[in-house]
Amino acid sequence: MSRLKSALLGYYIPSFFEMHVNTTQEDMTINHLPLNDMITLFHEYIHFLQDFTTYYGLNGIYIHSEYLHSVVTRLYALHRNDVKVPFEIKDNTDKVLLNREIRNFTLGDDSGISNFNIIDIQEAVDDLTNPEASLSSIPNVILSSDNDNMVVFGAMAIMESMAYIMERLCSPDYSVKSPDFPYMAAEKVADYYVSDFSNDLLMVLALCDMSLMTSNPGFYFVDVMKNIRDGNLSFKTPEEIYDHFYSQEVSHIDGRQGSFLASYKELLECVEKQMKSYLRDMSVAKQYYEWIDRLVAFAIDWRENDRCFLLKMASNHLPQNGCFGKAVRDVGTPLISNNNPGKYYKVIPYGIGLEMDVEYFKVFYEIEKVFEYASTECSLYEWCTRSPNATPNEYCKSAPWRNCNEQKLCPFALVWKHWNLSTIIPKK
């Protein structure tokens, strides 16, 4: 699982709505945090927004959901209790292997490299090991630096570049210096093709945002910059970048050609159904569904009614940033951890009850780790020991699925049982 990082000050876990801020503050109320911690939280919050308001972010949620669905369905078909983990998917009949491979290729590299000065950019092609008739390879972009480093410029670098630009624009006097790659990768790539393009960071920001509205952000970013260099495209303002992208026709899921916005909303609707399908016909899921509805409504309002929302956010300083405040008011925060063991925090959106359990996504992540990495310890253990309603035991650290027989079900056991996995015993 790739984590989006901010120079070790924090990280965000894509598709599972969880962020970490490297602090020991007991009060994680955003406007009560010291400014340096607020900036880190803001950087990770941008990754949270990327997760559900961009095509690439939504596609990541879709792929993880399809993986979990595929594994659970295959477990049912085995008709046995003991299941070897990591669980191996041996065929590509449901395209899970193909989609995960494409995701890995298009993510690119994220290793921190200081003083990364580009001397060459090459386009390459990765052959897929699980190809289809219409798709056998994926184009990517390789950056070479003057200190002999070679990296793949993909979605990860664009997401980090975008968050780092937002961090610097919204807190110009307090932003912490981060490695050139991946945090300034988009700026350096842009300047490689068009000298001084990054002098206006809002231009780079807009192109990052729109690149994440594609299935291969790194390749799209470079293609646009090459067209600008060659005189085929010209943008005087960042708003014009949005206008250009919104005017393009793209392929929909079923192969039809149509507007970018229609394709985006189609994927958003699909992901909404997937997220809701994690918890079905459960009384505890009412607030969970309502939060997902909030995410979807916020994403549609941004992309359909206020396409330059990010530019507005970038033009206001922390902590008095009205657009940041609107986002937190409308959708709250993902689950937040810090350096205090077993403590999690969240900001509830305005108008939703305290029962809003974003921590269920933490459970989905824990279950995925069981299947993919043979994880045997639930990382919610410390949190459960602090909960007055939980009854943690020795199984939490060695076989949390065995807690399905307890009278009071912890979140992990509740979901494991809800997915009809009570008889399944993972074994390495």
Image (cartoon, rainbow, N blue to C red):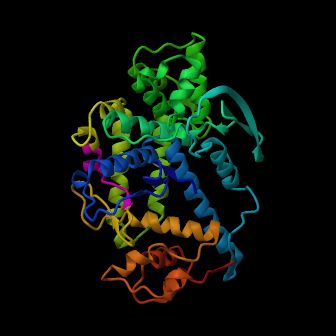
Quarter holding residue 69: bottom right
x and y percentages locating residue 179 in the rendered image: 51, 40
x and y percentages locating residue 222 in the rendered image: 60, 26
Q: Does the magenta stretch include residue 330?
A: yes
Please provide the residue range marked out in magenta: 325-336
User: Relative to the observer, which residue lies in front, 403 or 121?
Assistant: 121
Report whether 111 appears left or right of 202.
right
Q: Is residue 41 above or below residue 265?
A: below
Q: Which residue is drawn at 25% across and 66% down?
A: 354
User: Relative to the observer, which residue lies in front, 29 or 262?
Assistant: 29
Q: Quadrant of the N terminus?
A: bottom right
Q: How many marks?
A: 0
Residue 194 appears in the rendering = yes
Q: Residue at x 70, y 54 (%)?
A: 97
Q: Residue at x 38, y 55 (%)?
A: 292
Q: In which quarter of the image is the C terminus?
A: bottom right
User: Relative to the observer, which residue lies in front, 385 or 260?
Assistant: 385
x and y percentages locating residue 363 in the rendered image: 47, 69
Q: Which residue is drawn at 27% across and 65% down?
A: 26
Residue 134 appears in the rendering = no
Q: Is residue 342 above or below residue 317?
A: below
Residue that lies at the very extreme toward the top in this rendered image: 231
Report whether 164 appears left or right of 90.
left
Quarter holding residue 151: top right
Report whether 129 appears left or right of 322.
right
x and y percentages locating residue 375 in the rendered image: 59, 72
Q: In this view, does 396 lie above or below 47?
A: below
Q: Is residue 335 magenta?
A: yes
User: Relative to the observer, which residue lies in front, 33 or 221?
Assistant: 33
Quarter holding residue 288: bottom left
Report whether 24 appears left or right of 378.
left
